[in-house]
Each structure stands twice: as structure tokens, then as C-alpha cells.
Image: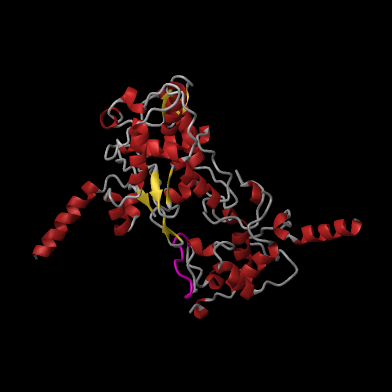
């Protein structure tokens, strides 16, 4: 009898929690991988975060200034920044992703050589910066100048592509939770980038993930840092608004 | 010199996946006519179906393949396909499943046009050759409900 009453209570209470069906890729992982992400001493992505912290504090380029020279204590000054990217860049009058902003700072303000997209230095700095927003909700800027690029990203997301002829949406909206062979299909919320992927045995960017998906579909990849990549990221961040960041996430 | 060119021409013409698909006719939700003159081989067809880099079938479908681990669950089981669908209906679904269901996630196995952003090394090539498709069809036709296990 008690048990029945309990079930009735659950039946009433559940719909209240079921309003947001969105889930991070974290929720699709096994308990071992989840534990690896949650423990900073076991999370291999933390090595990049630590490397990024050292880079943040080191003088670079002709300016002989460090990131910290201007931004001071990242745990305060950079908190929440990654949750708001991509953002509209006043200098180039175009949307810019977080890695692009770091490249801009490196070259224009520090007078240092441009760090390479996907390279170790840029991944480390990006993960250190994004790590400062861990546990904060994704909060895309309400900037009307981003709207058209975001719409391009939305269109790309639902365009059939490649020899296999399916769209991002067909897997990550219509079939999320299903299995492609052994692999569970997540909802494609970019909550933890840069992240450590066990399959890569490395930390990688969202744009690397795009390449992975597209090459699986036998489609032309989207170049890192390209307008298309930023458009898709803008759309995905808007779609994931409110979900908490996890950088550095661990994924299978 | 000409002999070498002639040999190359023969090689190219045998690489069926690099060719424009042969014309086919869709009638009553089926392609009744085989794509080639050589009868499909069900044993070869089964090998293509289970080979994940080639047929790709088990990424989405499960089927009567007890030796295969991790079969996908995004599409109907292949068990009993030959009882549910005619040979011609299976052929149409292999060639271009969007002709049956425009929202399908099943890749078109015999189509080179009307696709977007195809990677350079796959451009102009069909997923499987006409003969491979006939082999797969011969195998799927053999999957009757009473012989599934």
C-alpha cells in the first residue's frame, strides 16, 4: 500500500522534472567515464587546463606581456566568458569563436605568432579559459548582429550532406538516444569543449568533432575557424542555452 | 601504348562504383528489373551486409547475425525482410530509399546526383556497385520469417 502511494507521488512529481528533455553528452556515458570526468585528478583534460594556466601567466610576443598582465586573475576576469561565445567581434565586424578571440589577442595585443588552430598551445589556452566557466549555464549573447550567421548554422544543421546523405538533425534530434552500432547518439550539445575524447586519446575542439561527424558521413569537412564552423557553433550554443558547461569534459 | 590505354579503359569500366549509375525504372513502389545481368549471390550479399565499412547496414539495423556484436537500433530489424518486401521493393530501398520515405536516414546506395557536400574521394561514386547491390538483395530476399534463426 505504501509502495503504491509512493508510485502515485512519483507519477505526479515526474512531469514537473521532465520539462527540459535536453541532456549533455555526459548523461549518455557509462559511470566509469562520468567518474573520470568528475575527478580532476583522473580527468586527462585537466593536463591541458594546467598547461593553459602556465601559458596564461607567461610573457609572450614582442609585447612581453602575458594574458594575466591585462586580464589579471582568470578565475575572476574570465569567468563566464566561454559561456557567451561565439560573440560578435567589433574589429572584424563578424562573429568570432573563443579560439579565434585568443588568436586575436595573441597576435594583435601580445605581438606573438598566431597559435595554430587545433594546436597544443591554442587548445591549452582555450581549455583554461573555458574551464573558468565550468558549471555556469551557456548564455549566448542577445546580439542581433549574430542572428543571420546563427540562422546559417541552423540551416547547415538540417541539411543532408555527404554520400550517406543525412543531416546533423536526423541523428542528433530524431535519433538521439539510439545506437549507431555500439555508440549511443547524444543530442550534440557542445557543453564541454575543448574536451578529452578517449577515442582520440587527446583533447580536441568542437571543430574536430565536426570533422569527425562529416567524414563519417563522407562529406567535405568544415574547416576549423571558418565562417561555417562558427555558424554551426553559434546555432548549437543557442540550442544548448542554459545547460551547464563542463570543460574539460571527457567523452568516449 | 594503345594497348596500355585499352587496358586502362577496361579497368575503368569494371570499376562500377566510379561510373554513372545505369538507368532504372520505378513502378508501383519497386524496381522490378535487376541492375545487372548477373544474378545476385546471397553469400556475397551477407558478407557485404555484415561488413561495417562496406555495407554499413549493421550500424543502424540489427538482423539474424548472432556472431555480430553491437548491431544498431536506429532502423527496423532485417529479420524477415524477404517476407515483408518483394525483391523489387528491396531494390528501390537500396537504390534510393528517399523515394519511399523522403525523411529516411537510409543512405542511397546507388545515387551520385542530388547529394550535397560529398567528400572529394566519394564524389561521383555510388556507395555500392550495381552487382554488390544485387548480391545484397539476393541475401535479403532469402531472409524469410520462418528461416530467421
Camera-side residue: A7 or A217? A217
Judge whether B19 appears above or below A237 on screen: below
Whether the magenta-drawn stretch holds residue A167 is answered as no
Q: Quadrant of residue B143?
A: bottom right
* Magenta stretch prevailing secondary structure: loop
Q: Nearer the viewer, residue B19 or B39?
A: B19
Residue found at the far left of this picture: A2
Residue A103, horizontal then vertical, whole percent: 45, 29
**Horizontally, is A102 left or right of A5 in the view?**
right
Residue B105 appears at what percent x and percent y? 52, 54
Residue name at image x 26 percent, y 32 percent: A75
Report whether residue B62 is seen.
yes
Residue lying farthest top?
A: A91
Left or right: where does residue B13 sit relative to residue A7? right
Can you say whether B13 is above or below A135 in the image? below
Quadrant, the N terminus of chain B: bottom right
Range of the magenta residues? B66-75
Residue ID at (58%, 50%): A218
- Across and down, in percent, residue A102 comes to 42, 30
Residue A124, relative to residue B122: is it above or below?
above
Q: Taking the image as drawn, is residue A147 in sight? A: no
> Left or right of B95: which side holds A139?
left
Amino acid at each position: 500500500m505504501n509502495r503504491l502511494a509512493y508510485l502515485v507521488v512519483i507519477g505526479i512529481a515526474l512531469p514537473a522534472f521532465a520539462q527540459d528533455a535536453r541532456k549533455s553528452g555526459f548523461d549518455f556515458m557509462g559511470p566509469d567515464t562520468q567518474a573520470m570526468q568528475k575527478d580532476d585528478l583522473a580527468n586527462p583534460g585537466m593536463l591541458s587546463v594546467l598547461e593553459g594556466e602556465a601559458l596564461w601567466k607567461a610573457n609572450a610576443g614582442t609585447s612581453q606581456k602575458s594574458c594575466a598582465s591585462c586580464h589579471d586573475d582568470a578565475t575572476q576576469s574570465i569567468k563566464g566568458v566561454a559561456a557567451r561565445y561565439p560573440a560578435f567581434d567589433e574589429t572584424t565586424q563578424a562573429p568570432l569563436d573563443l579560439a579565434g578571440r585568443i588568436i586575436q589577442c595573441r597576435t594583435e595585443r601580445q605581438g606573438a605568432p598566431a597559435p595554430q588552430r587545433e594546436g597544443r598551445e591554442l587548445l591549452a589556452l582555450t581549455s583554461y579559459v573555458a574551464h573558468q566557466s565550468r558549471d555556469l549555464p551557456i548564455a549566448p549573447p542577445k546580439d542581433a548582429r549574430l542572428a543571420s550567421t546563427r540562422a546559417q548554422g541552423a540551416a547547415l544543421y538540417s541539411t543532408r550532406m555527404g554520400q550517406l546523405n543525412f543531416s546533423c538533425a536526423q541523428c542528433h534530434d530524431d535519433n538521439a538516444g539510439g545506437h549507431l552500432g555500439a555508440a549511443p547518439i547524444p543530442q550534440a550539445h557542445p557543453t564541454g569543449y575543448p574536451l578529452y575524447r578517449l577515442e582520440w586519446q587527446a583533447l580536441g575542439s568542437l571543430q574536430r568533432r565536426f570533422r569527425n561527424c562529416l567524414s563519417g558521413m563522407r562529406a567535405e569537412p568544415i574547416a576549423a575557424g571558418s565562417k561555417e564552423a562558427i555558424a554551426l557553433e553559434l546555432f548549437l550554443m543557442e540550442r544548448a542555452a542554459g545547460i551547464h558547461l563542463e570543460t574539460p569534459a571527457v567523452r568516449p | 601504348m594503345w594497348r596500355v590505354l585499352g587496358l586502362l579503359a577496361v579497368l575503368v569500366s569494371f570499376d562500377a562504383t566510379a561510373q554513372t549509375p545505369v538507368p532504372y525504372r520505378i513502378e508501383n513502389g519497386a524496381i522490378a528489373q535487376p541492375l545487372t545481368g548477373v544474378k545476385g549471390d546471397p553469400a556475397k550479399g551477407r558478407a557485404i551486409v555484415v561488413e561495417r565499412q562496406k555495407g554499413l547496414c549493421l550500424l543502424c539495423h540489427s538482423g539474424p547475425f548472432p556472431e555480430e556484436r553491437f548491431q544498431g537500433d536506429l532502423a527496423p530489424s532485417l529479420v524477415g525482410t524477404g517476407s515483408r518486401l518483394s525483391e523489387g521493393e528491396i531494390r528501390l530501398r537500396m537504390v534510393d530509399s528517399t523515394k519511399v520515405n523522403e525523411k529516411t536516414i537510409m543512405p542511397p546506395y546507388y545515387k551520385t546526383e542530388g547529394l550535397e557536400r560529398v567528400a572529394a574521394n566519394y564524389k561521383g561514386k555510388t556507395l555500392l556497385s550495381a552487382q554488390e547491390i544485387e548480391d545484397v538483395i539476393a541475401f535479403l530476399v532469402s531472409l524469410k520469417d520462418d528461416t530467421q534463426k
